[in-house]
Amino acid sequence: MAFWLQMGFLLASLSSAVRGRVEQQLSPECREFLYMGTPPKGLEHQPVRYICQFYNKKPRYVTLYNIEQHIPIYSAYTFKRSEGEKCVDVPWMYEPQLSTSFNTDEMQPFPSGYMHMNFEDAQAILDDYTNAIHYERGTLNPDEHQNELDDKASTYTLTNVVPMVPDFNDRIWNKQEHIIRKRLNNYCRGTAYIVTGITTSGKMIRRENMNRIAVPTYMWSAYCCVDYDHNTPFTERNKFPSFAHYGLNDDENNEIVEIPVQKMKEFLKKTTFVNQNFQIFVGDCIPPSSSN
């Protein structure tokens, strides 16, 4: 009894700066991060939950989370112009609603002690990464693609994190995130919608003889910006209104492949299980008024 009383006291005293709302259907306020208010289609066959990620009482982005493999399938967000230099120092967060009956939609900092045992059944916890020496935490919605400190802070939740090979994450993937930030900073005039996700092939991180977290085989990302500078240099012109890229999550990969969104759909249909109606953006981000 004393343990449960202590657990309740600690939970009540934790900071509630970040909250994530688990939803069956996305609310209008969370659809603002999706092109035409529509999430990617064709991935819902998995045991997943939508998380509307809140920070300081404002929605920040959307995540589709796999509660069996304990990783996000994708995070969808709107790009914010920035210099990419601001940093924040916040604790890692978890999502109570994914696996407990706590009467709150507030995402919480990880507690000390063994309280994580109450929610580790449906999501990753910090202990899962402690001895995973071949991997580090990589964010799907990176803080580099956000400008305000609150937006940056909201990315530091394990529901936005997947295991990435350090060399690939630090040297290859982060470089591409930087390239996309500069491209959208320079040539996207309106809102840029980004979806960043993963594919898996059965490889898992284990803890205490249990499969805990699926390891991504490929990382992929796509953006959509229909309001762009039509005087964009020729070398960048074919990358609007949309483009995509992917990379193999291993320590031997030195390459990011950039392709049109339509080609990315074909690639993902070959490398992961998606439904026939799979789409990343409505109409592949071709503006309704376009003659093409």
Image (cartoon, helix red, strand yellow):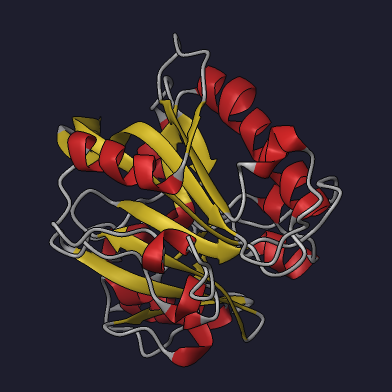
Depth check: 51 or 36 in front?
36
Question: Residue, x 74% and y 58% (percent of image)?
Answer: 188
Is residue 53 found left or right of 69 in the rendered image? Answer: right
* Rendered location of residue 281, percent (x, y): 41, 63
**Residue at the limit of the structure toward the front, as seen here:** 291
Depth check: 126 or 255 in front?
255
Depth check: 28 or 114 in front?
28
Query: Is residue 87 visible in this depiction of the protein?
Result: no
Query: In the picture, residue 210 is in which quadrant?
Result: top left
**Residue at the limit of the structure toward the top, as seen here:** 252
Q: Is residue 222 above or below residue 110?
A: above
Q: Is residue 135 above or below residue 200?
A: above
Count of marks overlaid on the render = 0
Question: Residue, x 37% and y 58% (percent of image)?
Answer: 280
* Rendered location of residue 234, percent (x, y): 74, 36
Question: Residue, x 78% and y 52% (percent of image)?
Answer: 187
* Rendered location of residue 167, percent (x, y): 55, 18
Is residue 288 found left or right of 14 in the rendered image? Answer: left
Query: Is residue 156 visible in this depiction of the protein?
Result: yes
* Rendered location of residue 27, percent (x, y): 42, 89
Q: Is residue 17 above or below residue 116?
A: below
Question: Residue, x 70% and y 60% (percent of image)?
Answer: 152
Q: Quadrant of the N terminus?
A: bottom left
